[in-house]
Amino acid sequence: MWRLLLLITLLGPLASWAQTIEIPVGQQGAAEIALPARGLTQKEVLMRFGLADQEHPAVGKPPITRWDYRNFSVYFESGRVIDSVLQHRPRSPAGQPGAQPKEFQ
């Protein structure tokens, strides 16, 4: 019983050191990347952003088409942009490509 009390006494203050950082979704990612605006046609996107790295065939009803570029994806319905989203790129633990946390080295 005294061990439990000692453990709670020692570990209790650690919980008060925890910090939660919240970043609103609109502030995540690189703001300088221009994305195709809603309503643009596929031809306008092609002229402004060039060929997509990958074009996915239409799926669903209504048919939705996706074009993937290096940093973002564009979704089309009936040949018009309905949404453009940045692609998630996880950062490596040490901020360097291929780096591993110390416990895995």
Image: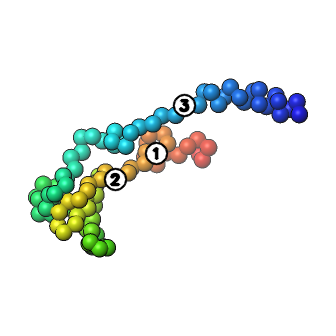
Residue 23 vs 38, above or below: the answer is above
Q: Amino acid at mark 2?
A: Gln
Among the two numbered marks 1 and 2 on one chain, the one whose residue lies closer to the N terminus: 2
Label 3 Cα crowd, 10 Å radius (few <14 / some 14-19 / many 20+): few
Q: Amino acid at mark 1?
A: Ser
Residue 87 is tagged as: 2
In the visual, does 21 lie left or right of 105?
left
Residue at 68% x, 25% y: name it: 13
> Is label 1 in a helix, a strand or a loop?
loop
> Is label 3 in a helix, a strand or a loop?
loop
- Residue 1: x, y in percent? 89, 34
Residue at 65% x, 31% y: name it: 15
Label 2 Cα crowd, 10 Å radius (few <14 / some 14-19 / many 20+): few
**Does any portion of residue 67 appear in the rendered image?**
no
Residue 92 is tagged as: 1
Name the residue furthest front. Answer: 62
Tell me the mark number nearer the camera, choosing from 3 and 2: 3
Label 1 Cα crowd, 10 Å radius (few <14 / some 14-19 / many 20+): few
Q: In terms of depth relative to the viewer, which is nearer, 59 or 92? A: 59
Residue at 62% x, 43% y: name it: 103
> Is label 2 in a helix, a strand or a loop?
loop
Which of the image's four quarters has the C terminus?
top right
Residue under label 3: 19
Q: In terms of depth relative to the viewer, which is nearer, 75 or 92? A: 75
